Image: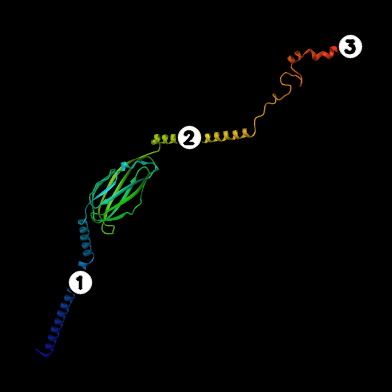
Amino acid sequence: MTSGELGKGKGVGSFVRNLIGFGLAVLLIGGVVASVVVLRSDTGPRGGQRSYVEELDQARRQLFQGQVVYTDAATLSLEAGEPQWFEAEIRGSWRQVPSGDKAAGAPVGAQIGMTLHCSGAAVTCTRVSSERKSVLSASDKATWVWEVTAKRSGKVALALTMTAYFRDTDTVLFERSFTDHASVATASEDSESWLVAALVWVKGAVLELGLIAGALATIWGLYLAVKNRRHPAEQPEEEATPTGTTGRPPGSPPAEQRQRTPGAARAPTGHDDSTGGS
């Protein structure tokens, strides 16, 4: 073998060795990259999703049996235009239910939200308390209040929904609804009480008018008494007339008195006659 052939053989061997080394380096780098990708996939979105699901399951397992107490719709005595109060309470343990309320078991041990949906008879339900409250232990309790107002008579439906949330998120752990119905009365249906109220008002007005009339009569009587005391009543004009009722001239004696006049009173007249005769 010549020296030229030997040189060519060495060159080919070196190329092969370099090629093999390059291939091994590529394989090694590929393995490292694949390992990094696998690690990232374990801690990426899918890994976080698995952790999130596990936390939700754990939170649901931590819920325990409590009690929900709410107003019986039949006891609301709804009347058109008159507001009534509807209440709901979540308790961490079972307790005695007050009269006029309903109760049911419900899981607690999380942040609880309560909503009241009303329908029918143009009814509105206005919440006057916060929507979410925490009931985390057996001694905890939370209360919600709504103002229920119907604008006309008819039937209304009240749907109370209890929702247990995962921490302070909108993720729901548990949800349950309670539906009840009630009747709305009108003022015309309560005509008897309206009539009674009207009669009471009339009676009071009559009594007040009687008191006013009595006071006015008393004042008028006092006024007349004072007036008569200051100005005594004078005799009538016809009684003070000198002629009286006989038509005699003033100073003329009555007829009986003229007939009873003694003869001595007429003596001067007779004396004159005798004198003339002599």
Q: Earlier in the sequence, mark 2 or mark 3?
A: 2
- The image's mark for residue 81 is none
Distance CA(mark 1)–CA(mark 3): 193 Å
Q: Which residue is mark 2?
A: 207
Q: Nearer the viewer, mark 2 or mark 3?
A: 3
Question: How far is disc 2 from disc 3 in space, using C-alphas?
Answer: 97 Å
Residue labelled with disc 3: 275
Q: Earlier in the sequence, mark 1 or mark 3?
A: 1
Q: Residue furthest left?
A: 1
Q: Residues within 10 Å of mark 3 (few under 14, many from 20)?
A: few
Is residue 124 depicted above or below 208 in this figure?
below
Secondary structure beneath label 3: helix
> Where is 28 relative to 196, above or below?
below
Place of residue 188 in the rendered image (x, y in percent of width and height, measured from the top left)? 40, 36
- Disc 1 marks which amino acid? Val
- Per the image, the residue denoted by label 1 is 36
Disc 2 element? helix
What is the three-letter code of the residue carrying label 2?
A: Leu
The local crowd at label 2, few if under 14, some if 14 to 19, many if 20 or more residues have their Cα within 10 Å, is: few
